[in-house]
Amino acid sequence: MARPERVGTTQGTVSYHGLRDWLDQVEKLGELQKVNGAHWDREMGAITQMLTETGKGKAPAILFDEVPGYPKGYRTLYGQFSTIKRVALTLGLPLEYEHKADIVKAYHHRMEDMKLLKPKIVRTGPIFDNVLEGDKVDVLKLPVPIHHQQDTHRYIGTADMCITKDPDAEWYNFGAYRCEVYDEKTIGCQITEGKHGRIHRDKYFERGQSAKFAIVCGQDPLLYLLSASPLPSGVSEYDFAGGIRGEPVEVVKGPFTGFPIPADAEIVIEGEAVPGQVRPEGPFGEWMGYYSDDVVPRPYLNVKTVLYRNDPILTCAPQHKPVDETGLLKGIAGAAEIWKALEACGLPEILGVWNHEGAPATRFTAIQIRQRYPGHARNVLHVAANCMAGAYNGKWTVVVDDDVDCSDMDQVLWAMGTRFDPMTDIDLIQKAWSSGRDPMFLPGNFNNRILIDACVPYNRKLKGEFPKVVEVPNDVRAQLKAKFPRLFNSQV
Ligand SMILES: Cc1cc2nc3c(=O)[nH]c(=O)nc-3n(C[C@H](O)[C@H](O)[C@H](O)COP(=O)(O)O)c2cc1C
């Protein structure tokens, strides 16, 4: 299969080590905002939403300190991934891109080239600075926020990595799953059907066994990014992170679970969920921008150990009406996985994939292709909408031609407005994988989807019958830029 051309250099390396070093580098980029004195009770979440919704892809990462009732130095971090630069820094990719979708291309190439690397077990690490066990267990030693205005509980887990183990394999998975605090020694962990942590937990429950969890709530941003990425079943995010870094992640063994936990993590909570033990979970402001999830009984964790570094940083990502700080993360990491799946199915000439931040995630996925055969566009639509990375809670999947930038909504709308026929270019998928997070979910947690073929009809393209686009060719652009450098300076 012909590989699409590379974007800049993809040979960069991940240049930071750990969350604290990442923060130093983000500060040097001028993208870190420090705020002292915001309250854990809804203020930090509201400030983040206000800065992010107006940020237009340029919002800062926000480090809150001097949280009322907590020692100075006990911090929370919001907004890790609201700029492309910070996602690129995390993945060790070039920081600048002409088109947003180019970073997905660069990440996709990085994944093709890398080898998985297992984590390295070390004896100790800063995560053991403070160890609370037995009666001393108290997750509220940390400045855990109430994030959204209508949440009723504090949530310690949002931008986290919840580690579980497959009972049938040496597979440690981690996923970003939300964790409500019920009291000092009890927390929730909401995992949607089909997610890997849920499958692990359910397997233990089916055998009448408790399921152990290690919840990391402050970690290397790369581990968080992978935690929120739809990696394939059976692949440990640790091995993937090692592959991207080109060196293994250093881990220590959790005292209760025995699970590998990052040696330099900020905060880790270990506990177990017992079959049959449930509590009402929610309400919580959700990623689609609504309080859409019902408050229903869900399994919870009895906390056994709380580990944290001196001056810990609790990482947070309360999602809200788009665009929120996770829009780009899903646009990039989620889209790269869809691209992988399309190629794994043998589909040629995939030039770009983008999950639009405004929808967000798979609610609006656009794929850019160079059409090679009749039905190519339809082929791509059905695979993109139904591969594991594209299937969960999708809504609109759109395919566009090679001359349309799939990450530019204006261009995608232009294609939908001019190359699409409502009678022949729509397919529908019914009863697809959804959840209560979707305000339009159907009984049984299904939803319906729409696939849009916004490519020039292949037969008309082949015969050269489709009208020519009003365009300035690349060579003319280059000549004019060279001739009038000052005129175009601000645009190059
Ligand atoms: C900030 C954030 C919070 C999330 N919260 C949840 C959650 O509470 N439950 C859930 O099932 N998925 C949640 N997700 C999505 C999962 O992290 C994502 O689907 C991931 O791929 C899950 O890992 P897995 O594929 O290994 O199961 C969240 C994602 C982000 C970015």
Image: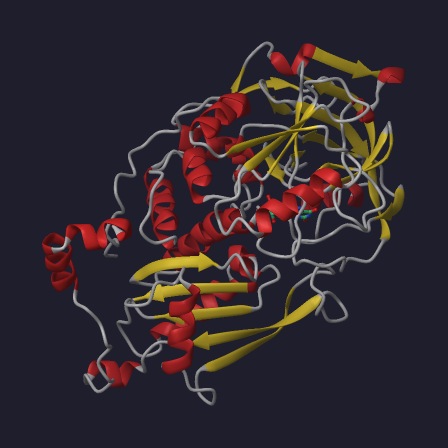
Q: Is residue 161 left or right of residue 230?
A: right
Q: Quadrant of residue 450?
A: bottom right
Front residue of 196 and 459: 459
From the top left corner, tell me how far across and down residue 340 is, in percent. Answer: 41, 52
Residue displayed at 82% across by 58% down? 294
Q: Nearer the viewer, residue 366 or 481?
A: 481
x and y percent of residue 250 in the render? 52, 19
Relative depth, front residue between 304 and 464: 464
Q: Position of residue 269 (x, y in %)?
A: 74, 26
Q: Position of residue 133 (x, y in %)?
A: 82, 16
Quadrant where the image shows the N terminus: bottom left
Relative to 383, residue 65 above or below: above
Q: Is residue 38 left or right of residue 243?
A: right
Q: Is residue 435 visible?
A: yes
Number of numbered callouts drawn: 0
437 w.r.t. 66: above or below: below
Q: Would residue 249 be seen by someone viewing this image from the given angle?
A: no
Residue at the extreme bottom of the image, as rendered? 423
Residue drawn 56% across the image and 62% down it? 359
Residue at the image position 50 percent from the left and 33 percent from the top? 222
Along the viewing direction, whichever of 182 and 234 lies nearer the viewer: 182
| Left or right, residue 263 beside residue 151 | left
What colour scheme has been applied to the protein in the rendered image?
secondary structure
